Image (cartoon, rainbow, N blue to C red):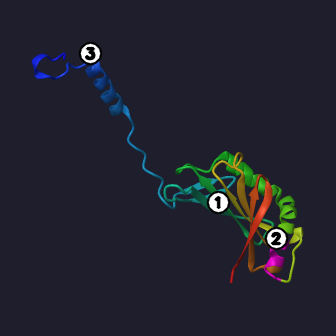
Amino acid sequence: MFGGETGEEAPQEGAIDIDALLLERLWRLEPARQPRPEGDIHESQMLGRMQFVPMPVGRPSFWRGELRMPDSRYTLLIVCEVTNDELPGSDQAACVTAFRRLQVQDAVLCTPLINERLRELQVGRTISPDDLVLTMIHLPSRPLTATRYELGFRAPALAQLAFTVVFLHGRPHSVRVDSDH
């Protein structure tokens, strides 16, 4: 025992200096940043006007927006998932641009899967790639390294139906068909 008769240990040399240094560093820390509020607006040249939607812990928050397409009667819904409450990334903007440019090629890839699903649902009709119009892009927070993303399509000949195609590793994997009715 260092403290003698009291049974208390003597403070280690330098402990007081470390505590003072720690307190000084804590005082210099910035206050915690407030989380981004729901409905916060972000204007992007590539993505348009987007609105923030926070999600509970464990689920990615996202930015949602719509672009008016000059060559379509449909708007393009864009959903960009984000980590915490960051802004959509330049990688997401680049992917949206690429998907818009490659929508005909994506329609060609998706048509067989959509037609298979239409036969399963006994719709009595099939579509061609020329019928499909890109109406939705849903991207994960890191789209260039992620294995999954979604594209949505509409076909004017089947105007009441919306097709959401899940891509895995760049290839159409599955399709969900939703009805407006």
Quick check: marks 1 and 3 in contact, CB under 8 Å?
no
Quick check: marks 3 and 2 in contact, CB under 8 Å?
no
Quick check: marks 2 and 1 in contact, CB under 8 Å?
no
Q: Furthest-left residue in view? A: 5
Identify the residue shown where x is 80% and y is 60%: 172
Q: Which numbered disc, 3 or 2, marks the residue that appears first in the sequence?
A: 3
Q: Which numbered disc, 1 or 3, marks the residue that appears first in the sequence?
A: 3
- Residue 140's place in the image compared with 8, above or below, is below
Residue 28 appears at what percent x and percent y? 36, 32
Foreground disc of the pair 1, 3: 3
| Residue 114: numbered disc | 2
In depth, the one of 71 and 63 nearer the eye is: 63
Q: Quadrant of the N terminus?
A: top left
In depth, the one of 55 and 6 nearer the eye is: 6
| Residue 47: numbered disc | none
Q: Which amino acid is tagged 2?
A: Ile
Q: Which amino acid is tagged 3?
A: Glu
Residue span colored magenta = 115-123
The residue wearing badge 3 is 13
SS of the residue under disc 3: loop
Q: Is disc 1 surrounded by few (<14), some (14 to 19) or many (20+) residues within 10 Å?
A: many
| Residue 79: numbered disc | 1
Q: Quadrant of the C terminus?
A: bottom right
Dominant SS in magenta: helix
Q: Is disc 3 surrounded by few (<14), some (14 to 19) or many (20+) residues within 10 Å?
A: few
- Verify whether residue 117 appears in magenta: yes
Q: Which amino acid is tagged 1?
A: Val
Identify the residue shown where x is 85% and y is 83%: 124
Q: CA distance from mark 3 to mark 2?
A: 74 Å
* Residue 156 can be seen, yes or no: no
- Verify whether residue 25 appears in magenta: no
